[in-house]
Image: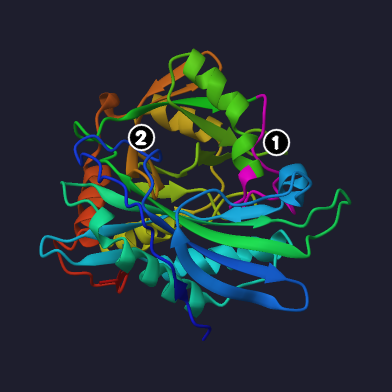
Amino acid sequence: MMEIKVTLTDHPKQKPDENNLGFGHIFTDHMFLMDYDDGQGWHDPRVVPYGPIPMDPACSCLHYAQEVFEGMKAYRTADGKIQFFRPGQNFKRLNTSCERLVIPKMDEELLMEGLKRLVTIEKDWVPSAPDTSLYIRPFIVATQAVLGVHPSAHYVYCVILSPSGAYYAGGIDPVKIYVETKYVRAASQGGMGAYKTGGNYAASLIAQEEAERQGYSQVLWLDAVERKYVEEVGSMNVFFKIDGEIVTPELDGSILPGITRKSVIQLLRSWGMNVSERKLSIDELESAAKAGKLEEAWGTGTAAVISPIGELKCGDTVTVINEGRIGEISQKLYDTITDIQWGRIPDPFGWITPCC
């Protein structure tokens, strides 16, 4: 394995107030970098002071969006230790995205070693206030300075860290969801929906803006072909409990294979619950609601873990779920997963990776 060089900052920042962290606007003292060049491969892994990445205005990532990213967290346990939640799954998915974007794959063992080295150096930045964490953003950008449309010959891999506050500062409140019927997030077959790349998120902004204008906090996306099958909620996977059956849309190539989604399915099945991965139409949801059979709904993702859904709006039809309250399963899932993440209960699934 390549040696990871370390250069420490001469100007450490003041640590923030852990009770006012917010999300994604505070960054630690250091970052991890690694370069790729045709003929040399990935090389020069290093931890350096956090700062700008030099970039030519003609870099292909700026013009043709050849880039991928991931999102994960580090948690401080009650005894002061720091641990990750399923980081190997994130690095595996990063390589899957790389393959689709024609970015050279990376050594996942080196990625893990680099992550551990960086977070160990930045361990004092991992907050200890209840339900806070250190958000981790690995990403790769194409850096060849050329305006031709073809895979880059040069790339930069970078990991930055951001201490983050509790997602639900005042407890878990169900969100209101706007069903998007005009725009689509991703093509159902052969597109980019199953990969974590920035263009997917840029494509969602116009619908998110309309949802917020109507007083809704997230967007429920439908399939691109028939415009009737449920896909994702915002940047989360989605689950519905219908007449005792827990349904989540199947991974058909347009839906991101979420790591929290995978964990939720495994957890639910370990509890003996009936979980189906299948097509689910908005009509089926509305019919189930009218029949009193739509019992509960929630989204899953790294940031919120579990985000209960209290209301859906599709066209002029507004559906209230579980009287707008968090459901029993949503609460149990949130409590169990976060207790594992912060080390409050044992991890029977092998999801936790120790750091330092």
Q: Residue at x 63, y 61 (%)?
A: 156
Instruction: Please tell me in which quadrant of the rendered image residue 77 appears.
Output: bottom left
Secondary structure beneath dot 2 equals: loop
- Which residue extends farthest right? 148
Q: Residue at x 71, y 61 (%)?
A: 100
The type of residue carrying mark 1 is: Glu
Q: Give me the C-alpha separation between circle 2 and circle 1.
A: 24 Å
In depth, the one of 150 and 153 nearer the eye is: 153
Q: Residue at x 26, y 62 (%)?
A: 123
Residue 226: numbered disc: 1
- Which residue extends farthest left? 79
Q: Residue at x 28, y 29 (%)?
A: 322
Q: Position of residue 318 (x, y in %)?
A: 44, 18
Q: Which residues are magenta?
A: 182-198
**Which quadrant, please, contains the C terminus?**
bottom left
Specify whether residue 295 is in view: no
Q: Main secondary structure of the magenta part?
A: loop
The type of residue carrying mark 2 is: Lys
Q: Position of residue 305 (x, y in %)?
A: 33, 48
Is 192 colored magenta in this rendering?
yes
Residue to which mark 2 is pinned = 293
Image check: 14 left or right of 45?
Answer: left
Figure coloring: rainbow
Q: Earlier in the sequence, mark 2 or mark 1?
A: 1
Specify whether residue 345 is in view: yes
Q: Residues within 10 Å of mark 1 (few under 14, many from 20)?
A: few
In depth, the one of 100 and 307 nearer the eye is: 100
